[in-house]
Image (tube, rainbow, N blue to C red):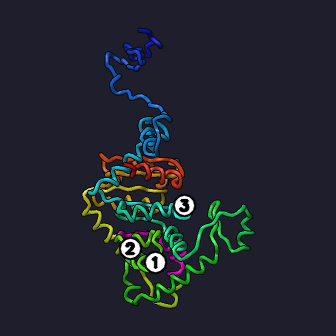
Amino acid sequence: MRKLWSDPPGLTRACVLFSSPQNDLSLNVDGRQFGDIMDRVLHIDLQENKSVSQLLQSMEKVGVLGAGRLGRATSITRRMLNDSDCFTYLSMSGPMVPGGLRKVISYLVENNHIDAIITSGANIVHDLVEAYGGSHYRVPEKSDAELREAGMGRIADLYVNEKDFEVFEKRIYEFLDSLSEEERTTLAPSEFLTKLGSTVNDDKSIIRQAALKNIPIFSPGLMDSMLGFHLYTYSTMNKMSLDFVKDLRILGEMVVEAKKTGAIMLGGGLTKHFTMGSTILRGGLDLAVQITLDRPEGGSLGGAPLKEGVSWQKVQTEASFESVIGDATIIFPLMIIAALEN
């Protein structure tokens, strides 16, 4: 037995013992043994990891830092997707559709892994741009003035073409013209999006798959998007007024009837708050995963740790939850592939 440091004040005995040939650590404080509760960091072994699922399970065994958080988040996500009693939200802010996640999300919807989507209006717009034949582009770096002159709009290092938005505007106006005056003035936004999705022919479209599967899309910030802008311009010539309060009634009824709730939240802000806030009706989420680049120091909800939601009754006291700090366009598809692997 070899003592590695002196007894600190207030402790009668404090030492680390080499207790086995494997060098298991056992901490003895005031005669209490803590060896049984000290979990080792188990390092990733490349020879044992042949799939994404195996890698993320190894990260869970690492247990610390970003790897540990991603491993635990994947495990929680797997529980959500495999539990038929769990009403599962997918919440999205930021450029998730133009950032490459469109087919990942539509796959989850098509295969009944998601029960409701909460999203920014922008992700709906970008899904429809592609559904109507447009694209998102990677082009050589240009100044923003050059892009403006060329009719291109920039989102970080990807670009959209003004001509694609002209097609989008035309198709939206055609859809609005097809609605009766009663529909244009009584539909909730989620009902409006279901009807819009039923007119889309692209099977990879999120909004189309949601309409086919009767999965509601809630967009509390719908007006803060090009779709919202076209609703406004249309309303200057015709009666047009969606019922946003009705959406809360629709979602509230679903939440109250759920046996348990889970949420995968990509980014923060309004969509995260709307998702978590709706579960106050039943005391909060049972399972929750957040992937965000926001930080907590400013006190914003986007960067708030999920445990903060416990005090607001947005997360159950005994819930399983994990926050992963990082880019969702990288982390989310890896997490989903691992969660769905057998």
Q: Amino acid at mark 2?
A: Ala
Query: Sequence order check: which comes first, mark 1 or mark 3?
Result: 3
**Residue farthest toward the top in the current orientation of the protein:** 1
Query: Which quarter of the rendering shows the N terminus?
Result: top left
Q: What is the span of residues highlighted in magenta in the rendered image?
A: 215-232
Q: Is residue 55 magenta?
A: no
Q: Eyeballing the image, is 41 above or below 82?
A: above
Q: Residue at x 29, y 61 (%)?
A: 281
- The percent position of residue 154, horizontal first and vertical second, equals 65, 66
The disc label shown at residue 100, or none:
3
The disc label shown at residue 211, or none:
2
Q: Which residue position holds label 1?
A: 200
Query: Sequence order check: which comes first, mark 3 or mark 2?
Result: 3
CB atoms of marks 2 and 1 within 8 Å: yes
**In the shown orientation, is residue 129 left or right of residue 27?**
right
Label 3 CA crowd tier, 10 Å (few <14, some 14–19, many 20+): some
Residue 129 visible here: yes
Q: Amino acid at mark 1?
A: Val
Query: Sequence order check: which comes first, mark 2 or mark 1?
Result: 1
**Nearer to the camera, 289 or 111:** 111
The kind of secondary structure element at disc 3 is: helix
Q: Eyeballing the image, is 293 above or below 65?
A: below
Q: Residue at x 74, y 64 (%)?
A: 143
